[in-house]
Amino acid sequence: MAILFTTSWSKDTGRWIPALKENLPDFEIVTYTRDGEPVDWDAIDYAIVWQPPPGILKQCKNLKAIFNMGAGVDGILANADLPENIPIVRLVDPCLTEGMVEYVVHWVLHFHRGFHVYRDYQAQNKWRPHWYPRPSDRRVGILGLGELGGACAKQLVQMGFDVAGWSRSQKNITGVDSFYGHDQFEPFLNRSQILVCLLPLTKETEGIIDKKALAALPEKSFLINAARGKHVVGDDLVAALDAGNPLAAALDVFDEEPLPADSPIWQHPKIIVTPHVASLTSPQTASAEIAKDIYLISEGKPPRHIVDMSRGY
Ligand code: NAP
Ligand code: GLV
């Protein structure tokens, strides 16, 4: 029994292989890099991938499932020659969720308490304390109330924030106002003083944070994008920031990654850049989650978190 492991995160191979061997001791782990070393494709039962080289998955004639090494599947679904009728399983992992909750809570608190302003004051040697509202008077809106958005919403509710979320289907999360569907998008934006994007990237959500959406935000708003760069129309965001609303944005993800060294985004005074690190996949916990699904499949049961190809997430 063999598992194909291929990732564009080549630096991580040294941490993944021992973790996979520990969790799946009965499997041979076949690593494939872009150098294209020979592989017995027919022997491969499962593939664990991030941005796999085009064409290789289709060569595995006995594949039972493909495991994506992250939550977002936009990268793998863009692969033009995926094998048909093989389930693609996305990563749902407590460690990935924890990391995202930390990231979102960090930036919500940063903007809520006005720490972005003290950054500017410090550059001017200015000592100027200012007041801040209670969390219950701060309305946070989360685009996408799935595994990650839902966990962030729950944590922010626990901290006393006034939280709403927008999703495709209606949600019932204690303390969270559920907005859903196209018609409730604008009312949701109208109340979101801190807007957090945790949507998957699909053809419906690409460019969703555009000029019109930004104009629907209340005055003195903030944006946190921890999903994918293509959710935001970059020029519209820069124009809105330059015009004064949103007041600031924390961006973890970009249309082009790495963000090119000559991008004006780096130096924009109202944008905080992090290099796609909102939440990193841990080889240890992710291997354990993948192993649970492989054992489910070997018992004739379906794996959890299969990607719905018609919805694209
Ligand atoms: P998920 O569990 O699939 O949740 C997606 C949420 O978005 C669901 O609530 C879904 O609504 C909603 N949604 C999808 N399409 C929609 C639409 N057209 N209109 C309204 N709502 C829509 O995904 P997740 O695990 O939370 O992950 C979210 C994204 O985070 C990933 O796709 C990935 O791109 C990103 N991510 C980024 C990092 C990072 O480090 N920056 C790390 C991990 C993940 P329903 O619940 O009604 O289906
Ligand atoms: C990271 O961006 C992920 O999708 O897990």
Image (tube, rainbow, N blue to C red):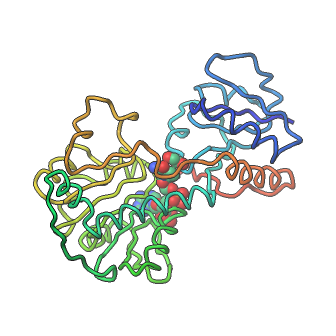
**Image location of residue 194, percent across then percent down:** 30, 67
| Snapshot quadrant of residue 10 | top right
Q: Nearer the viewer, residue 1 or 226?
A: 226
Residue 45 vs 279, above or below: the answer is above
Please identify the quadrant where the N terminus is shown.
Answer: top right
Residue 190 vs 272, above or below: the answer is below
The extreme right residue here reads 26
The reply, left or right, for residue 172 in relation to residue 58 is left
**Image location of residue 212, percent across then percent down:** 20, 57
Q: Tell me which residue sits at (36%, 44%) in the image.
A: 230
Q: Is residue 72 visible?
A: no
**Image location of residue 69, percent across then percent down:** 62, 44
The reply, left or right, for residue 100 in relation to residue 181 is right
The reply, left or right, for residue 55 in relation to residue 23 is left
Residue 186 vs 274, above or below: the answer is below
| Snapshot quadrant of residue 133 | bottom left
Q: Is residue 275 visible?
A: yes
Q: Tell me which residue sits at (38%, 58%) in the image.
A: 197
Q: Tell me which residue sits at (20%, 65%) in the image.
A: 216
Residue 16 vs 290, above or below: the answer is above
Question: How many tags in the picture?
Answer: 0
Q: Tell me which residue sits at (77%, 50%) in the image.
A: 291
Q: Nearer the viewer, residue 65 or 1?
A: 1
The reply, left or right, for residue 92 in relation to residue 116 is right
**Image location of residue 34, percent across then percent down:** 61, 20
The extreme left residue here reads 243
